[in-house]
């Protein structure tokens, strides 16, 4: 078993991060497997070196150790571009110049009706047929979207966590109607979360992806990309989210307390485990 924790160095780790990291770490160690660390820093406008160093410091304080070198997304931009070139040459991508406001306006037109998917409003296909891709044409500078009509196929994945446990079959029709054309590359970053996470999990040979339940719906996008790029599909485990006393996600709270703050206030790693409802380390 190989699991991973993949934080972004855009702010301090909080209790929700602690839960995800400890969960993945303990799962791997209990099975005699490996726990890997990945830094998701493709958004260089927000990533900061001091937050990355804080991640390492907090994880070590929690008593977590990781195997092998840390994978950093900013070192893999050529890998993401090669995958985009492959999909572009297979005519599975199209250039998109739509803004969020454009999508909202098109999706709210009376004949359309507003529909939401894993990426928010389902893309109405505005740019999908704006000129055919020329053979051998370079990747355009605008956003690249997956042409779901051409790419979609029936897929499945296994979920082992209680919230969604079982085999999940996703039909081509569902991918087209309920997911739609998703962004795989943005001008300012050169890739997107969906593409990067799929390629990174394959590069690290992740066998079990553990992450929050808020990403469950996005899994169908990832499994589709794995099929198109001939990559293995891991087993998935989407765990509960850590919420405050009002049911609000800590990750969405402006005042979500950093692990470092709990440390300053005298908390122990055992206290953090109790706070997030995980057993003491062995």
Image (tube, rainbow, N blue to C red):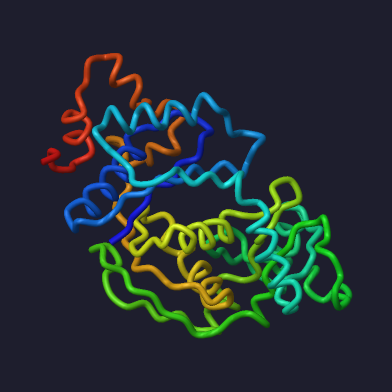
Residue at (24%, 33%) from the top-left corner? Answer: 63
- Side of 233 where 106 appears, left or right: right
Residue furthest to the front in view is: 68
Q: Looking at the image, which residue is at 49% across and 31% down?
A: 52
Quadrant of image for the C terminus: top left
Question: Looking at the image, is 271 positioned above or below residue 160?
Answer: above
Residue 183, percent from left and from top: 66, 61
Residue 225 drawn above or below residue 52: below
Q: Nearer the viewer, residue 153 or 207?
A: 207
Tell me the quadrant of the picture where the N terminus can be found. Answer: bottom left
Q: Nearer the viewer, residue 33 or 62?
A: 33
Give the image quarter of residue 255.
top left
Q: What's the residue at 32%, 78% (across, down)?
A: 167
Q: In this view, does 35 lie to the left or right of 279?
A: right
> Horizontal and vertical percent for residue 5?
38, 47
150 relative to 138, above or below: below
Pick out the residue farthest to the top.
Answer: 265
Task: Report the front residue among 101 and 146.
Answer: 146
Total numbered labels placed on residues in the image: 0
- Residue 261: horizontal and vertical position, in percent? 34, 19
Location of residue 189 in the rendering, given as x and y in whole percent from the top left corner = 69, 47
């Amino acid at each position: 078993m190989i699991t991973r924790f993949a934080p972004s160095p855009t702010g301090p780790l909080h209790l929700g991060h602690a839960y995800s990291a400890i969960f993945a770490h303990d799962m791997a160690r209990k099975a005699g497997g490996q726990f890997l660390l990945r830094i998701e820093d493709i958004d260089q406008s927000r990533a900061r070196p001091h937050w990355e160093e804080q991640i390492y410091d907090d994880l070590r304080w929690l008593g977590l150790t990781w195997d092998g070198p840390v994978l950093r997304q900013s070192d893999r931009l050529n890998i993401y571009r090669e995958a985009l070139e492959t999909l572009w040459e297979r005519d599975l991508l199209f250039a998109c110049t739509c803004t969020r406001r454009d999508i909202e306006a098109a999706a709210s037109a009376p004949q359309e009706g507003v529909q939401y998917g894993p990426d928010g409003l389902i893309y109405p296909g505005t740019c999908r047929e704006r000129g055919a891709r020329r053979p051998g044409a370079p990747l355009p500078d605008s956003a690249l979207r997956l042409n779901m009509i051409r790419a979609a196929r029936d897929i499945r994945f296994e979920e082992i966590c209680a919230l969604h446990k079982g085999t999940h079959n996703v039909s081509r029709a569902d991918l087209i109607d309920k997911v739609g054309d998703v962004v795989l590359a943005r001008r300012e970053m050169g890739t997107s979360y969906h593409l990067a996470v799929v390629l990174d999990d394959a590069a690290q040979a992740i066998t079990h992806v553990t992450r929050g339940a808020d990403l469950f719906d996005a899994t169908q996008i990832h499994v589709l990309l794995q099929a198109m790029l001939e990559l293995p599909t891991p087993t998935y485990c989407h765990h509960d989210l850590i919420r405050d006393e009002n049911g609000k996600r800590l990750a969405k709270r402006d005042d979500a307390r950093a692990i470092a703050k709990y440390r300053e206030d005298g908390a122990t790693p055992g206290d953090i485990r109790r706070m997030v409802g995980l057993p003491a380390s062995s």
